[in-house]
Amino acid sequence: MKRYIALLLTIALFSVCLYACQKPQEKTVTEAPVTMDMPEIVDTHSDDGRTVVGISMPDRLLERWNKDGSYLRAQFEKRGCEVLLRYANNLIDTQADDIMDMIREGADLLVIAAVDGAALTEVLNIAKSVNVAVIAYDRLLMDSDVVDYYVSFDNYKVGVLQAQYIIRILGLANTETPKNIELVTGDPVDNNARYFYNGAMDTLKPFFDSKKLVSLSGQVNFYETSTAQWSSDIAQQRLQIILNSYYPENVKLDAVLCANDSTALGAVRALETDYKSKNPVAVTGQDADIANIYNIINGTQGMTVFKALREESIVTVALSMALLDGKRPAEDLINESDWDFKCSFNTTDYDNGKKIVSSYLLEPIVVTADNIESQLFDTGYYRRNSAGLIYSAK
Ligand code: BGC
């Protein structure tokens, strides 16, 4: 991997200073403990023959991040990289510490799905100061000018797809009867949550404006409908309160727009325990998690948005290898790859407050009971064992 000459000179200077106590080929981490305020790391990322990739995922609770972690690890290892993979347990400080550790352990490149997109500015600056490349994975890293690239899905479109499903299933285009909806949006510190919300609300706005859609709780703005940590329990509790306060017997709820599958699980549980009418309620989701696939099959959840994580990891690894090779890929990464999926390059829409981050965006897909077999089972993404239980095949 090519390193800049200026950097090598700097490293050489440091190396001379540290010569007395260190072997030349060793990773040069100072003895003093590293604190976030006074990073005492010198460049540990010179060409030492290793290519080390640090992967920082937000948590292990959600099925998806486990898959992301293992897809990424497998592909990086196949290309001869050493992989450091950490899960932050949804804790901002843990994630910053994880990243710091990975820098100290010699990571050349970091792939980060942030717990809180705006909370890592300091540690990212440290990464950049020792020449570590940074890819924001799935969630944009905010307030930082050192993010090299962003790889994700078209997150605005995820919200659009959820809203379009509700419009279709409630027949909003052809009815004068108002329908009731409640919103369960995502974690406000996750930058994606706002994209999902905006995509959905821009699409539903004409129906809210014409009063064809009504939220009896009156809770429609992003913050009041948000769900800390995307927690199923928090989503469940909030919807239970809403059901008991605004939906007594004979007051129908028609839809719950849930931003993802973990919130949809909570919503479905709340509907099962605290909803007094018998009509089916259209519930949306995102991720195609196994528990939600069962719910789509049994009819308690209407749809999910499937995002092919394997493809997200393929793009990330291709981009990483190019970056480690000293390239700054653009459209050419897509044009020169033999991917059998759609991916677009965007240089205009992902402003993180400090810069517009060049982004590779994949296409989300709607999954309902009608196409679940063709999209998820026929493709081999999920399989059923002899007892009919669903498991993840790849
Ligand atoms: C991801 C979703 C996920 C959610 C909760 C979002 O940033 O894009 O796929 O469901 O986080 O982890």
Image (cartoon, rainbow, N blue to C red):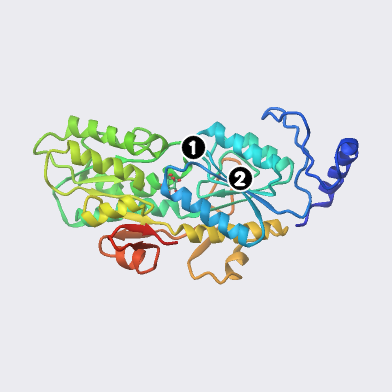
Position of 73 with respect to 38 (left or right) is: left
Labelled disc at residue 89: 1
Observer-side mark, 2 or 1, equals 1
- The image shows residue 173 at horizontal and vertical percentages of 21, 56
Q: Is residue 149 above or below residue 365?
A: above
- Spot occupied by residue 168 in the image (x, y as percentages of width and height): 24, 57
In the image, what residue type sits under mark 2?
A: Lys
Q: What's under tag 1, amino acid-wise?
A: Asn
Q: Is residue 137 left or right of residue 156?
A: right
Q: At 49% from the left edge and 37% from the top edge, which residue is drawn?
A: 89
| Dot 2 or dot 1, earlier in sequence | 1
Q: Secondary structure at mark 2?
A: loop
**Quadrant for the N terminus in the image:** bottom right
Asked if residue 141 lies left or right of residue 177, the reply is: right
Please give the name of the residue rendered at 44% of the width and 50% of the height, measured from the top-left corner.
Answer: 64
For this orientation, the residue located farthest to the left is 250
Residue at label 2? 355
Q: Quadrant of residue 125?
A: top right
**How many other residues sit within 10 Å of disc 1, few (<14), some (14-19) or many (≥20)?**
some
Residue found 31% across the figure and 51% down from its top: 292
Q: Quadrant of residue 293?
A: bottom left
Q: Is residue 355 above or below residue 218?
A: below
What secondary structure is found at the residue carrying circle 1?
A: loop
